[in-house]
Image (cartoon, helix red, strand yellow):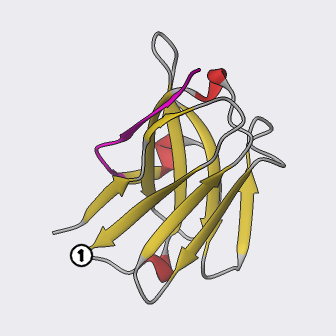
Amino acid sequence: QVQLVESGGGLVQPGGSLRLSCAASGFTLDYSATGWFRQAPGKEREGVACISSRLGSTYYADSAKGRFTISRDNAKNTVYLQMNSLKPEDTAVYYCAKKSGYVCSLREQSFDVWGQGTQVTVSS
């Protein structure tokens, strides 16, 4: 069974950090790009970051550049999103997703397997 499970969300103060994890099962992350997306209340889901293990490349939305880092551990079949300098506007449900291909993009139509999401709340 192909599955993605996110973890690591929670409540953090502005300026704080969180690391999200996305554990894959039923497939190997090596052969697909993996992305992180988020959806804030009342807003559309948006792409945050993508990593291609096969190409050794990463791609970030402007909102994530300089603050977020996507990485992977192939041995654990897990992708991470390190989020630093968090802002209240980063509050959202964060999803990881597997792309049907190994070239990164943030077009959610290109992603065919999604996790259940993890809540991130940035508030004082």
Q: Can you name the residue that lies furthest to the top here? A: 42
Percent x, y of residue 71:
62, 69
**Above/below status of 71 relative to 49:** below
Q: Can you name the residue that lies furthest to the left here? A: 1
**Which residue is at a point 41% across and 61% down the rendered structure image?**
22
Percent x, y of residue 3:
25, 62
Picture quadrant where residue 77 is located: bottom left
**What are the residue bounds of the magenta stretch?**
113-124
Q: Name the residue tied to disc 1.
A: 26
* Residue 103 shows up from this direction: no
Q: Is residue 92 left or right of residue 115?
A: right
**Which residue is at a point 31% across and 60% down the rendered structure image?**
4
Return the residue nearer the eye: 124 or 83.
124
Membership of 57 in magenta stretch: no
Q: Is mark 1 on a helix, strand or loop?
A: loop
Task: Give the residue type at disc 1.
Answer: Gly
Instruction: State the quadrant of the C terminus.
Output: top right
Instruction: State the quadrant of the N terminus.
Output: bottom left
Percent x, y of residue 5:
30, 58
